[in-house]
Image: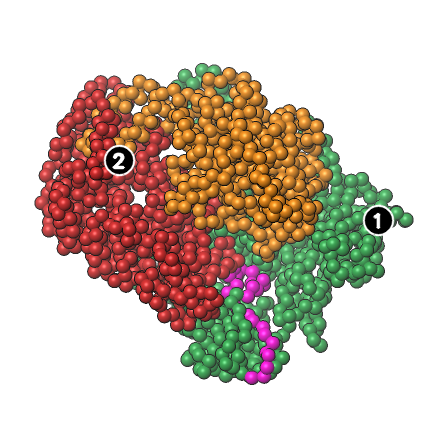
Chain colours: A red, B green, C orange
Amino acid sequence: MRRILFLCGWLSLAATSVEGVAVPLPGPEGGSAEAPTLQARAPAASRSLDRAVFMFLRKRGIPHAGTCPDHVFLRRAYLDLGGRLPTLEECKRFLEDEKPGKRAALIDELLARREFADLWAMRWCDVLRVKSEFPINLWPNAVQAYYQWVWTSLRENKPYDRFVRELLTSDGSNFRVPPVNFYRALQSRDPRSIAKAVALTFMGARAEKWPKGRLDAMAMFFSRIAYKRTAEWKEEIVYFDATRPPPGEGKDEVEPIFPDGRKARIEPGRDPRAVFADWLIRKDNPWFAKALVNRVWAWLFGRGVVHEADDLRPDNPPSNPALLDALAKTFTDSGYDLHALLRAILNSRVYQQDSIPPSQEAADESLFACYPIHRLDAEILIDALCDLTGTRERYSSVIPEPFTWIPPSLGAIRIPDGSISSPTLEVFGRPPRDTGVMSERSSKVTADQRLQLLNASRTILKIERGTLLRPILRNLRRNPRRAITELYLRILSRYPDQEELRLLDGIDMKNWRARRDALVDLAWALINSAEFQFQH
Amino acid sequence: MRTLEFSSSILLGILALPASAQLPEPHLGYAYPAGAERGASARVVLGGQHLQGPRRVLFEGKGLEARILHYCKPPNRGQLNRLRQKIREWLLARHPELGRKDRRRDPKVQAKLRRMRANPFAVLDEMGPEVFKRIARSVRLNAFDLDDLKRFLPKFRDPKRQPNAQIEETLTLEVSVAPDARPGLHELRVETNRGLSNPILFEVGQYGESLEREPNDERPDTSACATLPCTINGQILPGDVDRFAFFARKGTRIVAAAQARRLVPYLADAVPGWFQAVMTLYDEAGNRIALVDDFKFDPDPVLSFKAPKDGTYVLEIRDSIYRGREDFVYRITIGRIPFVTGVFPLGGRPGQATSVKLSGWNLSKPTATVVPGKARDGRIELRFRQGRRLSNPIRFGVDPLVPIRAREPDDSPDQARKVELPVLIDGRIEHPGDLDVFRFEGKAGEWITAEVRARRLGSPLDSLLEILDARGRRLAFNDDFVDKGAGLTTHHADSRLRIRLPEDGTYMIRLGDAQHHGGPDAAYRLRIAPSRPDFALRVTPASLSIPPGGFGVLTVHALRLDGFDGDIRLSLLDPPPGFRLDGAWVPKGVDKIELTLGAPRKPQAPLHSIRIVGRAALGEEIREHEAIPAEDMMQAFLYRHLVPAEKLLVKVPGRARRGRTTPRLAEPGPVLLPLDGGRWVRFTGLPKANALPRGLSFELHDAPKGMSLVKTEVPEDGMLAFLLRPDPASLKAGTKGNLILRIYLTRTLNRPGAPRRTRRIFAGNLPAIPFEVIRRL
Amino acid sequence: MKDDGTTMKPNTDETLSREDGPLPLSRRDLLRGGLYGSAGLFLSGLGAERLLGAPRARAIAPKAKSIIQIWMWGGPSHIDTFDPKPKAGHDYCGSLDNPIATNVDGVRIGELLPLTAKHADKLAILRSMTHGVNGHETASYITQTGWKAGGRVVHPGIGAVVAKFKGYEAGYEGLIPPYIVLTGPQGRFSESGFLGSRYKPFATGGDPGRPKFLVEGIAAPGITLKRQKVRRDLLDRVNTFAKRRRGDPKLAEFFRAQEQAYDLILGDAGKVFDLEQEKPELRERYGKNTFGQSCLVARRLVEKGVPYVTINYRGWDTHKQHFETMRRKLPEMDRGLSALIEDLHERGLLDSTIVWWGGEFGRTPKVLWNPPWNGGRSHFGYAFTSVVAGGGFEGGKVVGATDERGMSVVDRPIHPRDLLGTMYSLMGIDPESTLRHPQGDRIPILPPPDPEIPTKGFLREIV
């Protein structure tokens, strides 16, 4: 019952917002995009995901959306794997490519690019709380070492179990052995807090909601970590203190027990963290694979199969358990290969669905009956705006001395440090990286954000003075439609439809200023449109 | 500022009042380029503060001279604004049309303004150096010519550049290096009218040198390392990234070794506390092949790769967090160069041949024979000859004991190897988790010291040392032992423990790695011997300027070992005539003390090398150690390090002084200061109190909390003396040390127009007063 | 800005060694000998009070509607401004060694604050602020939230708390957001803490000191009203994407936000930032610089009923060239602050507006003459000064005192939570109230009193 009220709420609301303009009936996707090209047979893993979703929907009699046209898939894949819009040439090359397997080929090409490591290192650094300042206090030199290690691991597609095992069991200096920073990127360093961070990061579990005693037992695995300072500014050695008795034997210590209830046997001199890590990365571990695949699904779809993507617990079941199991199985079968998991998801028809819900029930995001639209992340949006207009944002930090000046070509996505930000990035929801919880990154739309893009001098100057309009302006007078097409391809990565081609018809092309203002206004309007600011 | 004259000659003797003595001594921050090729010459810029009146540049080691070409002191904020105003006035005078009211509408004027703004240099050239010099003089800028302005224009306009007074003045030199000069780092100091600067480092290179040419952030510089091997000199400014392209043939092992922190080891006002370089290597397509930000535990990165195919590669260097400043100077030696990554064993016996195994890259001979000379603090720096070239410097231990080799398996107590004390063991932690255990027999009450030397000799080992009894129970353990003498080491990873054996019997020493690492490089030297109380001395600063007849303050640091807590007598080792030490002792229970060095009234030479030696009674034997000169450098606003220097040089600026006597403590030996009211301390050779000029005052310098200078004029006889009173609330009887009295002169300057301001000028020190607090006389 | 985040315990060997001037007193010193010796009675008294369960102190009556916070970013030197120590000698005062009288007899302030001296009758100078934290961001955090850094939770600052209790949820309908920052956020100290982005301040950007003060987003250069309307229509025609997805809640939210934005752009709510509407001589009185004009904008915002305005005044972290910076910046601050107090007073707004002047800590009274500081002052969290005026605070008062060198607090120590609690009470916010943390539990807006700095609680004596 609650859902139906919820639905009516939309309708009344949406109707009023766009008043006064004739609203075309929701027909087939407009624009010159032809029917989706013949799909090469998807890999087996993708088909298992499709089966899990479509059977689930068929049982409930809910239709699912058709496959999205090429231009929607192009933009979606570039943003999900590369964190940037396709360039004009890349748009044309893909849209005019006839080969049936071109989507799978694009996925493989994007996975192999440097931008994949840039984007996903940013995502992982949100989860790992990579931040130099209060309250995490990694300090700048450790942040850049930690970021490089995460970036290199993603670039080499290091198996996820080895990635986690190195994070949990490394010893050494926070500058020379970067993964030890996992045990420094915490708000407090007592064993319980460390256990809570491990549970949140690698098990997608909120340990404070666990039954009594389970967290204390798990904390024992992290009770033998020692930190020692050196005479180098902010260097800290994190290591397993072998001089102390095994966990559980110390004064008023509980016995170390794995979260699934099994007891752990730790001989003297053996690092308890390694014992826990070996238990964690086993294929039959109920949390490990599920937590990762759910987090990756949330990064791709804006919402996890379990909502609040890092809050897996019995009384918060996945909206489609079969889908979560299929994902976890795909991931463990591939030997914890992140590229394989992404290839399976992006080649699936569930991922390549259109984002227009075929019916009201199908609009419920938790069903994945269509691709749920969600606003672009702050860093992706700002970098896209900069790349489009050929301008650069300057990021700096007053924490180190002398000050840090990030080279403009780096952009927002590749900033290693959560403490280096800008008012614009914060308005668009860049996470402070204080707790590592996924909900820290906000994708809500606020009036401040709209003000920034609608009317801020920074945005206006970017559009007017940037390099976006100069080439288009030259031949605008001779062929306005070609100019509009180029603008659409650059900004929205698609060809304009017939009606959109007529947008500049009323303009007096002979008057240079009128022509220029019209083009600037059109570019401004496209950048301020929901289609540009949303992932769809 | 008026110079200050004094009548009475005695006063002239004491007070260091020639104009030069008032302003602080010259300070050097960096040299760029920080080196030159052997047998070549190079134009070098030194950056620092108070460098006016440069006289000559001094190098340690032969074969290096420098000619001073130009001194530049850039304008401060006020002078810059006045200079800009004056240049604008000159411009309007030359081009009146620029000043017209309607200039905005006149396109010709606008075009000219645009041209000028686009190329300000053209305007300056039109002005010419003479006119500019006159303008600069008018704003009291007498060491700033037209070329300097052109060099500094980008800095004034760049919002990223922060003003930094310590390194703003520059000195341009022409350095020439003899073909037989010793390759490696040499100390460089500048002598000015005012005094002697601190030492900084200048390297004599073996390969061709080149200078980076900006801009090379986006497009790599192709000329810098056109021919390999070569040494690139560069400077990282804020947000700067330097890229260099080089050609490498398939299969060659290219090594790029950066020196950044090694050139300027500590920056007082930078966090992190030095230029933390990161090097990245890209192939022709721009894919990243490697990224290194350190070498084992050393912050200077070393990158090594075997070229997969013939082609052009790009090497990039930047600060790890994109900072930059003029003193972020680097030298990268790149090419098929011999590079030693590790040596085993880590040390040898003085004067005896030791054969060592070398590991590293491009090494023609894997072994070498070393005959170590005498070492200053237990280690020397070696370079191994590989064909025509010398390898990178390697630290090598020197210890008289005959070393033995550890042999695996020796991991558990029952496999422990039996050794006779005193013993020196060369071994390795072969793999993570490897433990080396050694057994020895000990007698009750015997003091035993076990010390590891590894990190201080370049091994990455982070030692963890334990002593066990016969049953394997741990009696004591040590992880990190701070050795203040190891100035450049920031992680004091080497362990040292000292224990009194509880009973006769077998004991075991177990050595492992605290960070559970291990491998062929993790070598160590473990010395187990009966405890032998001892001490080492450091004296700072390594450069000092004392006016003739005046007194300069030196600080002596005593590194006490194995329970030694006695007095150390200090004295000068065959000093040049006229020099004398006052407060020449490091008393019981004190590790750091300030004392004064007195300079002769008529110095024979402007520069002197001063050597200080400390003697102490250890048991029946008198042991003697020379104090190693060092610079007390601050790192990142907080940490302090004693970085060793070759020599302690003293400059005695200014003319010789008339007058006969210099002040001296009336009674020798420590002055006893009673807690109930203190005591008058008298000096011979001081005038009456009323003969002192107006505004002269005395102050205790860095006295311990609770020690106060109460009066400076003896009521009865009007003599100048000092009533020193220790406050019982914060000082206990038995406290010993030195007190130094500083002379200040307060002058009120009423220049026309400027507000009345009093200036306090430091005018010299009195000889140090050794003291001991006692309950009552 | 150079210090690390952790509190620098002065007694460990890691601290500034002796050459850099005597060690600042640690809290243990404060407790053992210096400060509380004389207040021994006081200590036992406090203990007795807790034992006997003294009646709850009388509540402070709410009088204020808005707060203007002048945040002296970097930590101003207290002995060169409102807590002068002329007798401490050259090594402490440097060249600023003759303080001036004010219009309140017996109260003397720094010689570079002549204009503010004329309004001392409206100021309450709190000379005994202390929290002992020397890192910039941890000190900013404790001064503006009351909580020590390092806990599990990131607490919201007073601005965000006022925005929550006095903002949209409490009947504030202004289009201008309830928590405004002139002109850039503090960045490192996350003002809204766990309350999240809804309570983050709206940073105006731009520069009030320039002829045209363009608030980012509200006033755009060179875009006429007509063209704004043309653009709005074009935007609607282009949004075919949204039209095909009518009914999607995310797009509904997108358009709701867009409507609010256009109300600010096209409506007259944005006029409050237009300084041309003020008389030129009033703008002159404030001083034609960024800080002065920011004070004027703050007064206009408070006139419109905005509950919380922060002016982030940069440049006070004078590790080097301290006295040159003081001579350059203090006159500018003096002029802006005195003009703001006078203007509020003349318009009858002072009684309902709290003006809070202060930084995250003071600066070391003993000057660091040696290189590389050459006459600088470092951070000093053991004793510093804040000043409050209006909004129910009695004027012409001095609270607490420091020793003759400004090194330690000797009378009526004030912890930041005491000042914050008083201001909350004056704004009608119960200092005991709690906020809901996104992960469930309820968090009080103020911490319990700090046992290490026993204070007399809220500033009842000047309310």
Q: Badge 1: few (under 14), some or many (20 or more) residues near its Cα, within 10 Å?
A: many
**Residue C250, numbered circle:** 2
**Which quadrant is home to the N terminus of chain B?**
top right
Where is residue A292 shown, x and y percent of the image? Answer: 28, 54
**Is A474 inside the magenta-drawn segment?**
no
Q: Which residues are magenta?
A: B481-505
User: On the rendered structure, is B192 left or right of A191?
Assistant: right
**Residue B720, numbered circle:** 1
User: On the rendered structure, is A421 left or right of A519?
Assistant: right
Q: Looking at the image, which residue is at 29% across and 57% down?
A: A287
User: On the rendered structure, is B175 left or right of C126?
Assistant: left
Looking at the image, can residue B776 be seen? yes
Nearest the camera: B568 or A252? A252
Q: Which secondary structure, mark 2?
A: helix
Q: Looking at the image, which residue is at 21% across and 52% down?
A: A321
Helix, strand or loop for the magenta stretch, by majority: loop
Q: Looking at the image, which residue is at 56% across and 19% down?
A: C346
Where is residue C177 shown, x and y percent of the image? Answer: 41, 29
Label 1 amino acid? Answer: Leu
Q: Quadrant of residue C402?
A: top right
Nearest the camera: B133 or C451? C451
